[in-house]
Structure formats: C-alpha cells, structure tokens
Image: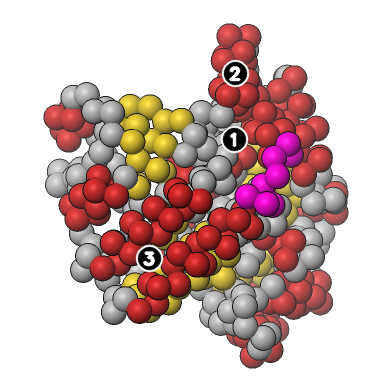
Amino acid sequence: MNLATDRANLWHPYASAVKPPPVLDAATADGAWIVLDDGTRLIDGISSWWCAAYGHACPTVVQAIREQAAKLPHVMFAGLTHEPAIRLAERLNLVMPRGLNRYFYADSGSIAVECAMKMAIQYQAATGHPGRRRIAVLKGGYHGDTVGAMSVSDPGGMHRIFRGLLPEQFFADRPSCRFDAPWDEASFAPMESLLEEHAGEIAAVIAEPVFQGANAMWFYHPEYLRKLREACDRHGVLLIFDEIATGFGRTGRTFASDYAGVLPDIMTVGKALTAGSVSLAVAAASDRVAEPIDVFLHGPTFMANPIACAAAAASVELFLSRDWGAETARIERRLKTALAPCRACPNVKDVRVLGAVGVLEVERIPDPETTRKIALETGVWLRPYDRFVYTMPPFITDDAGIDRIAEAMRALADAV
Ligand code: PMP
C-alpha cells in the first residue's frame, strides 16, 4: 500500500492534511476483525464508527450488494422507483416504531438530520406557523457535520469557528439525571423554561434519546423523554429523535427511545442500517407530519441508491433474524465487570456502560502515536477522543474479545 500517496494527497477526518496523524492500513475486514496490510488482526472495538454492528462483511449484505450492482447500480428517484427501495420500505415497516411510516432516504446521517429539520419547518409553515423556524437542542448533543446538523450539535469548538455560517438555535442544558439514578425533576427544568419562553419560534426539538453519543458519551434518564414529549405537545412543537447511533439494538433496545416508550414525530436512523457496508440513512415521519407538506423540498442525486437500499434491506433482515437482545445484554454484563476496576485508575473520572456501549470518561487521552502503538500491542482498534476512551463493539464480539477490548481501554487510560 503506498502510504506516501496517502500522506501527500488524502485528507483524513478531523485531521490536518499537511501534518496528518499516523494511520494504519486496513486491507480486509471480516466479522469483528480488521486485517491490516501486513496481516495483523485487530478487533474493531468501535464497529468502524458504530456502523458494523453485526461485524464486517456480513455475507448476505455483501451478496445483496453484488447482485444489485450487477442489475441496477443507480437510477434517479424522481419519477422512477425500484424494487430495492420498496423492499427496504417493507423491511422498515417491520422494525420502525408504529406510526413513523413515511420514509425519506438520505445519503448519510447528517443529511437525514437536515431532512428532519426541513420537514419540521415545512410542517409548521404548512399548518399556519411560519414563525416557527428554529430548532431547540440539548447541549452535549451531536447530529452531524453539515451546516444545519452542526447548528444543532453542542455549541463547543466548531460553533466558534463557523459563527456566521451556522443558523442560531436554542440550547438547553443537557439532561443531568443519569440513566441509572432516581429521576430528578430538576433535570427537565432548563428545557421546560426554554420551551415556555420561545415556543412561538421553535419548529421542533431534536434529541439523541437516552444516549448522547459523539459529544458527550452520556446516558440520561428515560423519564426526560416522557417529559419532553408532553412539553412538545403542550407547546405545538414537533419532536425529532436522532437514532442514527442508537438504532438497531446498540443500547440494548431496538431504539433507545424504547426505554421511555415515547414516539417522536420524526426519527432518523443510519449507521447500522446497512450493517456498516455503504452510506444510507432514513428520516422517517408520521402521517401527521407528512400530510400537510405539499412538496418536500429535498432531492439529492443519489437518493435511494439501489445498491444502498439492497444493502439496508438485507441488513434489516439480519437484524430481525438475530438474537441481538441476548448479544447486547451479554456484552453489557461483560463490559460492566471488565471495566469496573478502571474506576481505580487516576486518569478515569467515570465509568458508564449501557447495552453494547462502554465509556471511560478520562482527564486526558493519549496522543495518536501512543494510541496506534497500543492498538498494535493489544490487537484492539479503538479511537479515544476529547475526554473519552470508549467501545461500541460489533454484537458478535465474543467474551474473550470483550475482555481484550476492556484491557486495551485500560491501557489507553493508563498511558497518560
Ligand atoms: N447523528 C448522530 C447521533 C450521529 O452519531 C452521527 C454520526 N456520528 C450523525 C448524526 C451523522 O451521521 P453521518 O456521519 O452518517 O453523517
């Protein structure tokens, strides 16, 4: 593999083009494993940014991609439809919460979030509330890297630099009540007063239910979502749940919002939707949202790409055929036991586990070179960032693999 070309020409995520951090060269991947060019095998402890939930290169998904690529790789979706798009809708009907049955296929998670926000604003305009044009958000949230999605993500570093480009939204303090603590009513107060004060300008609230991922790695109490649903209804505000990271079993329920038994008006899913094979996401709306919207103003070139739809349909079938509940419960038990001793590490501030997600909140993370060395020494691929050393392993990772991941997490936490 010519890594000189990689260094000379390629821009990696969240990295400098001219002073790039070290990279490992992935040649193949199968099951829970990434195989490097020299044959080194690493457990993918973060399911390649949380999408390869059932492991890499799932045979039925790969087969569906092959067959579809040979038959109809792409066709525009305006004025035309195709069998894989319909097949995917039929599979989604089996898994999406009842009532969220109007599917807009988007190219990526960020685009699905953009679509969800646009749906909310068009819905409000169509139902006589053109002044409701902004979105209310939880601090600590993350919804993507496109402009609209950034505007509803935590107003940390990125907001400062892009000020002027980003639309200004309303932020409430993040839900402070932990998932496993007794419910604390005060935890909802910031959102309650935000809605009371500004509801007339707000089209929708967007939230990652129960698990705030990329920007907080924080599990909060499901009661917050019941309060949120009630408050949104009271104020005529739509509720968007972003289940892109949490959907398809990651937190131990099909959707994290199932912990609260709360139905949003719009839900976004992505990542595990194609079992980590190709990019596709969905913004799913209820009839109540879809009906007043005369013409939804969005239509990307590769919308409903047939290869992606075929991959997603096969992936949802895989999800439905697996005992993922038992798999994530096993991983949760194992991670809780294996990560408990990390509480004693001086660098570790908190240890949190829910479903197939394990988090060490740390004071400091190791530098990229140390991270790379620890990956090669432990045989586990993890990518600490900000204040987090975390894992979201493929559900198929066996107990020995989970123990190994926990050891690697400890090594990373101890390495500073
Ligand atoms: N929403 C959430 C909750 C996410 O975790 C992510 C990706 N980490 C996104 C949206 C954006 O998805 P994508 O990277 O596919 O654009």
What's the residue at 70%, 57% (across, down)?
Answer: 253
Q: Quadrant of residue 131?
A: bottom right
Q: Position of residue 400 (x, y in %)?
A: 45, 49
Magenta-tinted stretch:
320-327
Residue 226 seen: yes
What's the residue at 59%, 35% (across, down)?
Answer: 274
Q: Earlier in the sequence, mark 1 or mark 3?
A: 1
**Mark 2, other Cα within 10 Å: few <14 / some 14–19 / many ≥20:** some
Question: Which amino acid type corresponds to the residue marked 1 in the rendered image?
Answer: Thr
Q: Residue furthest top?
A: 70
Specify whether 10 is left or right of 58: left
Specify whether 176 is left or right of 256: left
Q: Position of residue 297 (x, y in %)?
A: 66, 41
**Mark 3, other Cα within 10 Å: few <14 / some 14–19 / many ≥20:** many
Whether residue 143 is situated above or below residue 43 in the rendered picture: below
Question: Which amino acid type corresponds to the residue marked 2 in the rendered image?
Answer: Gln
Q: Which residue is mark 2?
A: 63
Of residue 309 and residue 412, the one placed in the foreground of this image is: 412
Q: Which residue is mark 1?
A: 274
Q: Secondary structure beneath disc 1?
A: helix
Which numbered tag is attached to residue 94? none
Q: Earlier in the sequence, mark 3 or mark 2?
A: 2
What's the residue at 29%, 79% (across, down)?
Answer: 346
Cβ–Cβ under 8 Å for marks 1 and 3: no
Q: Secondary structure beneath disc 2?
A: helix
Mark 2 or mark 1, which is nearer to you? 2
Q: Quadrant of residue 255?
A: bottom right
How far separated are the C-alphas under marks 1 and 3? Answer: 26 Å
Cβ–Cβ under 8 Å for marks 2 and 1: no
Q: Secondary structure beneath disc 3?
A: strand
Q: Earlier in the sequence, mark 2 or mark 1?
A: 2
